[in-house]
Amino acid sequence: MHKPLDHQNRFDAARKEAGMLELGVCYYPEQWPREKWDEDARRMAELGLAWVRIGEFAWSHIEPRSGTFHWEWMDEAIEVLGRAGLKVILGTPTAAPPKWLVDLYPDILPVDARGVVRKFGARRHYCFSSRRYRVEAARITEAMARRYGDNPFVHAWQTDNEYGDHDTIHSYSDEAKRAFREWLAARYGTVEALNEAWGTRFWSMHYNGFEEVDLPNNLVEEPTPTHLVDYFRFSSDQVKSFNKAQVEIIRRHSPGRLVTHNFMNQNTDFDHYKVGEDIDVASWDVYPMGGLINGRLSDEEKARYLRVADPDQTAFNHDLYRAVGKGRVWVMEQQPGPVNWAAYNQSPADGMVRLWTWLAYAHGVDMVSYFRWRQAPFAQEQFHAGLLLPNSEADQGYLEVAEVAAEMARLPQGEVREKAAVAIMLDYESRYATRALPQGRGYAASAIALDWYSAVSRLGVDVDFIGQHSDLSGYKLVLAPDLVIPDADFIARLKASGAKALFGPRSGSKTRDMHIPADLPPGPLADLIDFRVTRVESLPDYHSEPVRYGNASHPVTGWRETIRTSETVLATFEGPHHTGTPAVIGNERARYAATLPQGEFLMRLVGDTLGWAGVASLPDLGDLRLARRGRLRFAFNYGSAPATVPAAPDADFLVGARELAPVGVAIWTEDGR
Amino acid sequence: MHKPLDHQNRFDAARKEAGMLELGVCYYPEQWPREKWDEDARRMAELGLAWVRIGEFAWSHIEPRSGTFHWEWMDEAIEVLGRAGLKVILGTPTAAPPKWLVDLYPDILPVDARGVVRKFGARRHYCFSSRRYRVEAARITEAMARRYGDNPFVHAWQTDNEYGDHDTIHSYSDEAKRAFREWLAARYGTVEALNEAWGTRFWSMHYNGFEEVDLPNNLVEEPTPTHLVDYFRFSSDQVKSFNKAQVEIIRRHSPGRLVTHNFMNQNTDFDHYKVGEDIDVASWDVYPMGGLINGRLSDEEKARYLRVADPDQTAFNHDLYRAVGKGRVWVMEQQPGPVNWAAYNQSPADGMVRLWTWLAYAHGVDMVSYFRWRQAPFAQEQFHAGLLLPNSEADQGYLEVAEVAAEMARLPQGEVREKAAVAIMLDYESRYATRALPQGRGYAASAIALDWYSAVSRLGVDVDFIGQHSDLSGYKLVLAPDLVIPDADFIARLKASGAKALFGPRSGSKTRDMHIPADLPPGPLADLIDFRVTRVESLPDYHSEPVRYGNASHPVTGWRETIRTSETVLATFEGPHHTGTPAVIGNERARYAATLPQGEFLMRLVGDTLGWAGVASLPDLGDLRLARRGRLRFAFNYGSAPATVPAAPDADFLVGARELAPVGVAIWTEDGR
Amino acid sequence: MHKPLDHQNRFDAARKEAGMLELGVCYYPEQWPREKWDEDARRMAELGLAWVRIGEFAWSHIEPRSGTFHWEWMDEAIEVLGRAGLKVILGTPTAAPPKWLVDLYPDILPVDARGVVRKFGARRHYCFSSRRYRVEAARITEAMARRYGDNPFVHAWQTDNEYGDHDTIHSYSDEAKRAFREWLAARYGTVEALNEAWGTRFWSMHYNGFEEVDLPNNLVEEPTPTHLVDYFRFSSDQVKSFNKAQVEIIRRHSPGRLVTHNFMNQNTDFDHYKVGEDIDVASWDVYPMGGLINGRLSDEEKARYLRVADPDQTAFNHDLYRAVGKGRVWVMEQQPGPVNWAAYNQSPADGMVRLWTWLAYAHGVDMVSYFRWRQAPFAQEQFHAGLLLPNSEADQGYLEVAEVAAEMARLPQGEVREKAAVAIMLDYESRYATRALPQGRGYAASAIALDWYSAVSRLGVDVDFIGQHSDLSGYKLVLAPDLVIPDADFIARLKASGAKALFGPRSGSKTRDMHIPADLPPGPLADLIDFRVTRVESLPDYHSEPVRYGNASHPVTGWRETIRTSETVLATFEGPHHTGTPAVIGNERARYAATLPQGEFLMRLVGDTLGWAGVASLPDLGDLRLARRGRLRFAFNYGSAPATVPAAPDADFLVGARELAPVGVAIWTEDGR
């Protein structure tokens, strides 16, 4: 369904025009007295902000009762902000339909997996499959687009807000059931095709018609995985079509403006590439503190990085959303201080807001907008910091933004993040596959992908993300930690591309119908590398298997495959079970790991693989991270001790210096460029 | 809504008349053959019991079918017990409506937070908002009150039983929804006032009328905290009015009798002070063993105190319910052996029933009633010990009650627990506030308050509890571990009172509408001590911050605030984050902790603060605890080794001796008084 | 309700005829193209398989629409398999009713404890109380039995599949409510008898009629335990009558064929003995790998036994189902490799399929059928290994079956597992009792029973299982780890039998009505051994009590009773609590443990008790296990090092040798027999 897009050229020009990182902020005029607006706008401009996002939760202020519109305040807010020199990003308010609307049409509300209606009182209380809500969302979007489409201060639009937040992609309503059946009928044509794909010969699950098919919740036991994966695909497609409807309305009434959506950190409940197809810029919301607390690291590591967060998670997502945005990415919400929603909500270290801003720029982000201008003293997010305290004093974030704004002046304009030599595959359907069939409690594809990314980053190498639709030209190495469902077409293009590749376990283990490939895994991957998986094991954390790689034995946990191969064996299992069988194999084009490399083993394997692919790398950087954007080189110190930046002797430091303090940022050029 | 009550004088006289601790027991004549009653009554009297509670689960025996009353057995039971010399406490049976009633009016049943009806088959299966149940509860109460109101053997009434047990304060029924809307309309007058208070400008949550407002369950994400706190307030008010309706009926038909309710250990689902306003004596149900197992201590500490329980939890509640009872407190149910409902149900050490009885008396309790006379060999609580085994043999508790009864004879009459020098604030609305907005997973106000109480107790100092309505005269020190929502009036009275005060973090952090105060926290508290909170962090257990206090560095976890102040800094954070910022500040009247003092740090801070306030204290008592009641001084040994009681050289030991064995109790007078 | 059965003689002859272990396989012709059937059948026969089970999930293939039957494929499949020399076991397909049937009669579906309907899409989606489903299950069973009842290739029938899998014994539907009321009316006759049994005098729970009684779910607090236990009994009886209805239909149309049901490992949701009464052979499904992962052992032990599984769990169940089958037991599904449903799914070590097969035979199993012939590449169980890989290559299991088939030829025919000297009591009603009233979170009767079994096995002693109905003749020792509800009749027969007995704590602690016995526990057990339980404690894992037994002090956790006795004290509690009180007592006939012996204490106590009962035992075998079947002696090595088999010097090894490698099996005879 995806076509490889050659978007790079199209947007490079645009970015070069943009010149330099732009800053912005999220603002809610409806939450503050009118008399504060002018000063707020003035201070924003003074601080060096160029953009301001408004409107995405304003429906009940715009239309407090059915058909009664109050545009005046928004007209005025846009005027005030625009006249102060700010470019407005206008959000469609569909993430939070008003109570009167929900009461009028209760089938707007989503239903949870237990069958309980999720009620009004917070946000995202709608079902993507509600036909009524589609009509209403289009109505309010059209009303806004008509009114502000050609407003000179409105430079961009955001559709809705954070699709997928609060686990809202999957709804189990009657409307969802109806829509799922329609989707299945469209996908399969005949119910016998569905029966074949779902394997309903098993357990007497045969369907006589699409109208017999139900949603996969509240079952006695797991449904067939194809049932689940189709439900995930359907749910994803519902997001795409919901979003696309808004984009089309906006484009009709607001030509020339950019359209974006603000995605969420590593959400894999829907296919972001597909939604990305319909927008101009991908944006995402950057909350590293909560990401750390709720994330993959051990408690010990969380304590160590408590106020600087996971050194790789944020960069990972910048790189991912750059791919989703076909090269163009913004940060719509940048955490400016402690927030309110994680299990614990620590403060970032002083300097982190600045660090995160430069990190974004280094990874190709063209605009960083902070959430939010002023901390709200009421409602759900009152513990969420802003650039200003609730009493309008400058908070720490404000000071750091001012610092960034000053530093921007020292840098050259028009630098563009270049295509990397290494690409990591993130395939959403493969994520649905392992979600539907995890097979072992410990298997977490998102953590595995981040571990692989981290290993590359610690070796000083830049990364792009790709999907199976992506253009592969120019890559020296493709890393595919969890490509469960490879397309034959992708494998063919990969083969043709000249890139080398390293695949993680489970790669190629399922067909698109979630079956085991006819001649055993890895299915089409066998075109690249010759092996067959004859046994699969998921293993508990309390047991590890020793793997011999190079001159050392490494413990691995979680997953093990027994394979048969004619390829060179690069690592072997050396425990008593199937001792001597291959753990990693390779030929001149591809490598496959029949295990989950971890820790030191992963670092070594990734390091060797980079060398094999001809990608230059550095010794392990520890808590230092590097990145390049055009001529600019960046270093970020996540450690608690000063570090020496591995810059060339002739480096010209524009920001910071060779000796980098904790939380420090250095920006330099080399070789006289 | 509360008025400070000057109740002390009114009840002192009553208590002096009472003379000495009285003992009682809970009895269920309907559960035993008629032929056992006479012997049971005789043995109760022989044992030295003065009171017997009956009737609180007898509805289906009184009225087995709608309108068919069987009073004969209860007439007879009261007669038998009364003639044996026992004073009867009669319970209204509304905690357990009969099945026929529930079938007749299904809307009596409560609904849980997931929307599922909570069915008949145990107890407390009613919704406080059911109008029908209000009518029925009044009807059965009136029937009982009419029949027994002037019965000479009935000396007191208990309303219902253990409000809040089994999480029954909060119901999500249609009746609750209706009543909540009415309550909101009464509180706010206009829906715009509600919109303002709830901050519905956020996330498009605006309401056009009270009829649009729903209960705060099954939402997509947390509701606004004001929605939650108002729901908690509403639920609390429903309990108060439900209880008050019964009290008024009883007072009408049974003048001169005492009315009580038996509260539960540290339940904070409703405002106990408000229910306490309407009754004569607060009573509570003392189950220290389960309290230990389900409580705040570490597994290691639980193992150490396994059969003596938490040395402070029980005393804490005696002191709390003394405040709820406006000085007058009973124990309605005292654990007499192992019970059935905790995660584990260990036996108390031999001697603990005696110890708990004297502990109660020392803390101002005037009557201790054991639950229950004889262990039931059937139904839910058959693993719950009684004073007698199911076969009527004396169990260990019986023997210890006999010992207490003998010891009572050695003590002087009419001793009254005096007002303490130190008061601890327990404010129910503040508890609702942190429940609605915990901000960090580890924040538990109840554990914090108990830690503070424990620190004071280990230094040998008696404590009173206060609410914001309480009379503050006479206190040298007020400890407020978690006063999130201070009244300006309370702060003014505190200021006027001359008492010094120590406030924990989060004090003053919310207005009554659950907003951040306009000029930042601590809101009205700033009248006492000058500071502003500019940053708030919740911190995980796996990270600790070092705080320098006195000559030592102490690790603290869980919570940290960054404050700005002109006051003296008493302790400072000394880790790398915001190093040197104040952790504890103070002036001549008030102190504020911007952290959660724990362990040794808490002991030192509390010790120093007592000294600062002119309250005499002792060195850390370890596992010994002291208390005073009039001239009587008490010591209790919770340790596993003998301890020396810190009595004056001239001490006159009435019970026990200076050397106190484990599980020992000593009672003495000093100075020839 | 049970009559002791003297079934031993009846079936010994049958088994002697059978001669030798038979092998079989589970096969799903409906899942494979017709063209594969012939080769599959040929290969099965070649491999040495004698039996093939088919049909148990084939309803929608047999009757794809209401009343439209497609028998042709099944006719042909049976013909193909039968002509290849295989005996067919035909499963009734009632474990998975088709979607059209569920849509036609939605009240077939079960309802979970929260009141949510459990939907179609997997299996076991029916409520045993649905009258409609009873009709439909009888209809399809009759249709199959009529068609294949006298088919010469059909040698046995299996009713339904795995009663109780996926927690499906307990349904909370309206049909279940109706049926429960009828069951109660039949059990009690009058509602007053129910009121008396349930103790509804407690908490006002009195019922005026059976129509007032509800199912025990969604209550405010636990129901009376008699309510729960009666619901468990009712649910169990529903399974028995559901199964019996099918058996009767089959017997009518298919005389002379064996009828079996395939039970599940240690499921105690229904009384297996009662279902066993109605069938000819008990079979069960052997999945040791998941049993280990989800089982009782510590993580350390799980890691140690990762690929050989718990050395006792499988043998325990062979012995148990031998009792359920009145001496006749099959394995219907033997794990042939990794599976898909446990928290982790590791591979068995090479050799384990062979080991498990011989283990089964050693424990009296006459037929071992592997699940499944070929791994399915689609649907829920695609990660479940078969004897063949999905592409029809031989997997490891296939090779091991071939090895077993070859070894069979070396062994003598007609050996019969003899009655053991030691019997372990497993009483289903007692399990309902502790499930209804666990009293302590840690109490797990199933783990306790397995611990006792393991202790006996490690001492080289064979075991039988018994229920209270069982014939006791010939036993030297009866072990009753958790006989909570002993029948007076059983106690009398035990007394008369001459067997000695060891009882665990809680034995005799409840009457059949779930009351405490009138003169305190142990009720009728007091006829065997004189003591009374005066106090019961459940204790947390973080606390242990020292017990003096022999010359050592042993830590015990979890449970402790204080008893009064005139018997000899064999072990005493020696901690500070009730120090010196009896922990184990005994007379010449019976012993009682007032504690939960664990680890070394349990090994010593069991060892001494075997000696006391005159049962010969060996020193602790560690990871070796022994068993006897007639003249054949077996040893199995679960350890990671070679072990020496404790065979007589004249042992004649038929399989393996005296030195036994890890995963090794030795079979020998001794004494020239």
Image (tube, coloured by chain):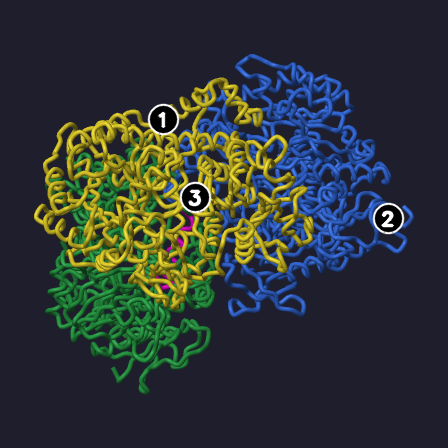
Chain colours: A blue, B yellow, C green
Instruction: Give the total of numbered labels.
Output: 3
Query: Where B619 sits versus A254, above or below?
Result: below
Q: Which mark is residue A617?
A: none
Q: Amino acid at mark 3?
A: Phe
Label 3 Cα neighbours within 10 Å, binned few <14 / some 14-19 / many ≥20:
many
Check the image and name the residue furthest to the top.
A68
For this rendering, which residue is in front, B197 or A180? B197
Q: Which secondary structure dominates the residues rendered in magenta? A: helix
Q: Where the N terminus of chain A falls, by quadrant?
A: top right
Q: Amino acid at mark 1?
A: Asp
Residue tagged 1: B174
* Residue displayed at 88% across by 49% down: A652
> What residue sits right under mark 2 in the picture?
A653
Crowding near the residue tagged with mark 2, few <14, some 14–19, many ≥20 C-alpha atoms within 10 Å: some
Comparing C1 with A303, the one in front is A303
- SS at mark 2? strand
Q: Position of residue B307 (x, y in %)?
A: 34, 60
The answer to whether residue A507 of the structure is visible from this angle is yes
Q: Position of residue A119 (x, y in %)?
A: 46, 29
C49 falls in the magenta region = yes
Asked if badges 2 and 1 are on one and the same chain, I answer no
Q: Amino acid at mark 2?
A: Phe
Q: Nearer the viewer, residue A466 or C81?
A: A466
Quarter of the image where one finds residue C323: bottom left
Along the viewing direction, whichever of C604 and A517 lies nearer the viewer: C604
User: Dot 1 falls on which chain?
Assistant: B
Picture layout, residue C238 above or below residue A571: above
Q: Which mark is residue B465?
A: 3
On the rendered structure, is A89 left or right of C299? right
Both on one chain, marks 2 and 3?
no
Which region shows up in magenta?
A: C34-50
